Amino acid sequence: MASKYYWINHQGSKEIAVFLPEVVEDVTTGEQVFGMWRLTSNPNEVLFINDVEVLSGPLMPPP
């Protein structure tokens, strides 16, 4: 997946988030995982790839 914006479902909430294709450490498990999400509504919140369901995307910019 590319570093672009997608509609996602996280814990029953549909939101727009950006996918960042980077290797990061899951602080709860200590594992190195590929990919993380940042919510547009709360950029400080990081979600891991398995925490979300991609609903659609990547979003296209307006013409």
Image (cartoon, rainbow, N blue to C red):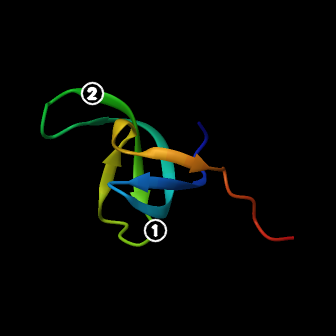
Q: Hey, which quadrant is residue 30 in on the image?
A: top left
Nearer to the camera, 34 or 47: 47
Give x and y (percent) for residue 8: 49, 53
Give the secondary structure at mark 1. Answer: loop
Do the numbered discs 1 and 2 sit on residues whose CB atoms are within 8 Å?
no
Give x and y (percent) for residue 25: 24, 35
Q: Which numbered tag is attached to residue 40?
A: 1
Dot 1 amino acid type: Thr
| Residue at left offset 80%, top offset 70% | 62
Q: Is residue 7 left or right of residue 44?
A: right
Give x and y (percent) for residue 32: 27, 27
Number of dots carrying numbers: 2
Give the secondary structure at mark 2. Answer: strand
Other-residue count near label 1 (Cα within 10 Å), few / some / many at <14 / 14–19 / ≥20: few
Nearer to the camera, 20 or 59: 59
Task: Of the two numbered discs 1 and 2 on the same chain, state the one appearing first in sequence.
Answer: 2
